[in-house]
Image (cartoon, rainbow, N blue to C red):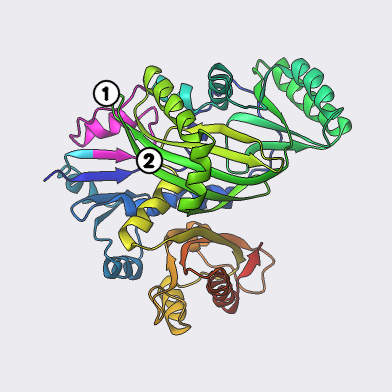
């Protein structure tokens, strides 16, 4: 039986990005980067019992024990551990989160001869410029305007601001709240143009997408997998929660929602997208982000993510547990390291850990992201110090009743607060 090694980095977009490209104004968030670096733990639902999961940091033993009790049996491996390299050679297949410049080389270094799409093809289809161009080519509804240079941004931006209260500037490889800039006034637009023009004077190239800031009724995404021969395996549709231009959660769309999309030829559009990606030379996992506007307009392709996605992870969780969960997270600040095993015990004691007596509950999905910022600093900040680290707890909340899901989520937040955390809404 083939044994598959699952691995990857969730910050793929920043690695696909061209260093010669100009950047939008942004505040560097070191703690966020650390949290993203240990999101590879979230890939465990993609593992079969004989498979292995390679993570940047070791998974807490309490988390491994809990996941095994739920039926998620896999072999954990941590980078940087001396015996890991030899153990990785026992695998015959590879399942990377995404294809990066060194993915093929890494696979070869541990004896895996996995057939992967060419890196240049992967970069191409993951660009938002490609998504916008494909939408136009296929005759799909799109509000994206490609921008070529700061002068072009100034002209098109001012024109859009005449008819819209705000506009959105998107980096071709921006992701989840990073690389998108909301502009509400001509004054702010001029400041952004000046910021980019200064970079262009230093040799940088400006390529962005520009969109009116739309009144969105709902966000959702379609997950599928393309074989190297072009056949498609459809996984499903996930409703998405976005807050302040950033991803905040996923839940499998119900049959009524999928039927409504079918009547509007949404899945016909997805087949066209799949055919186009295959023609472009890509194969592997795909997540197409879509949206429905408040006026009823359907936008089939907002962007294409040619990689594993949070939606696919949630789909695999649902399939294994045979329950419909809501994947989300809790962001918080803390001064002292929060013990992960103690957190699990507290959730169980409050009847909040899945499965509780009702068969509902919260499943914590990652352990390292809880306190990685403090751990990486190699010491805990004293409680009287003004510094707060950032942490994140990824969870799936399982309960059919909306009110019960909210209660469970709030209980998890209270448990964190009781351990000194400051919740960031």
Q: Is residue 377 above or below residue 339?
A: above
The residue depicted at 75 percent of the width and 16 percent of the height is 152
Quarter where residue 212 is shown: top right
Please provide percent x and percent y for residue 276.
43, 21
**SS type, badge 2:** loop
Q: What's the magenta bit mostly, secondary-structure-wise?
A: loop
Residue labelled with disc 1: 229
Residue labelled with disc 2: 97
Mark 1 near mark 2, Cβ–Cβ under 8 Å? Answer: no
Mark 2 Cα-neighbour bin, 10 Å: few <14, some 14–19, many ≥20: many
Residue lying at the far front in this picture: please name it.
Answer: 263
Is residue 391 visible in the rendered image? The answer is yes
Real-space Cα separation, disc 1 to disc 2, in angstroms: 20 Å
Relative depth, front residue between 142 and 152: 142
**SS type, badge 1:** loop
Q: Earlier in the sequence, mark 1 or mark 2?
A: 2
Q: Which residues are magenta?
A: 94-118
The residue depicted at 40 percent of the width and 73 percent of the height is 354
Q: For the residues carrying marks 1 and 2, which lies nearer the camera in this image?
A: 1
Seen in the image, is 94 located left or right of residue 45? left
Seen in the image, is 189 located left or right of residue 146? right
The residue depicted at 54 percent of the width and 36 percent of the height is 264
Q: Is residue 145 above or below residue 226?
A: above
Please provide percent x and percent y for residue 191.
83, 30
Please provide percent x and percent y for residue 230.
31, 24
Relative depth, front residue between 145 and 34: 145
Whether residue 346 is in magenta: the answer is no
Quarter where residue 209 is shown: top right
């Amino acid at each position: 039986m083939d044994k598959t090694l699952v691995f990857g980095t969730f910050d793929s977009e920043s690695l696909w990005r061209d260093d010669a490209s100009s950047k939008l104004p942004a505040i560097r968030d070191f703690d966020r980067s650390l949290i993203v670096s240990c999101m590879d733990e979230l890939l465990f639902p993609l593992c079969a019992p004989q498979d292995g999961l390679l993570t940047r940091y070791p998974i807490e033993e309490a988390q491994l024990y809990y996941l095994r009790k739920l039926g998620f049996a896999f072999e954990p491996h941590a980078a940087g551990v001396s015996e890991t390299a030899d153990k990785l050679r026992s695998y015959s297949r590879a399942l990377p989160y995404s294809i990066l410049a060194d993915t093929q080389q890494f696979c070869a270094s541990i004896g895996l001869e996995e057939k992967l799409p060419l890196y240049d093809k992967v970069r191409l289809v993951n660009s938002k410029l490609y998504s916008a161009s494909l939408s136009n080519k296929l005759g799909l509804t799109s509000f994206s305007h490609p921008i070529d240079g700061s002068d072009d941004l100034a002209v098109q931006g001012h024109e859009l601001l005449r008819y819209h209260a705000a506009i959105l500037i998107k980096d071709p490889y921006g992701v989840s709240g990073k690389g998108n800039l909301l502009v509400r006034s001509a004054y702010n637009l001029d400041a952004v143009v000046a910021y980019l023009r200064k970079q262009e004077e230093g040799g940088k190239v400006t390529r962005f997408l520009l969109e009116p800031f739309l009144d969105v009724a709902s966000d959702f995404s379609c997950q599928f997998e393309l074989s190297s021969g072009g056949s498609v395996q459809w996984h499903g549709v996930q409703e998405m929660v976005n807050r302040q231009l950033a991803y905040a959660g996923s839940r499998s769309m119900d049959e009524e929602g999928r039927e409504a999309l079918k009547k509007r030829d949404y899945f016909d559009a997805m087949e066209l997208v799949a055919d186009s990606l295959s023609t472009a030379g890509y194969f592997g996992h795909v997540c197409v982000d879509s949206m429905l506007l408040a006026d009823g307009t359907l936008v089939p392709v907002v962007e294409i993510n040619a990689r594993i996605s949070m939606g696919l992870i949630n789909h695999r969780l649902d399939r294994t547990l045979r329950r419909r969960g809501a994947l989300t997270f809790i962001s918080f600040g803390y001064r002292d390291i929060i013990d992960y095993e103690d957190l699990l015990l507290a959730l169980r004691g409050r009847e909040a850990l899945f499965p509780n007596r009702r068969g509902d509950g919260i499943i914590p999905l990652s352990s390292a992201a809880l306190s990685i910022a403090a751990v990486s600093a190699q010491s805990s900040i004293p409680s009287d110090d003004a510094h707060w680290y950032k942490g994140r707890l990824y969870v799936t909340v399982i309960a059919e009743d909306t009110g019960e899901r909210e209660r469970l989520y709030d209980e998890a937040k209270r448990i964190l607060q009781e351990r000194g955390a400051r919740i960031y809404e």
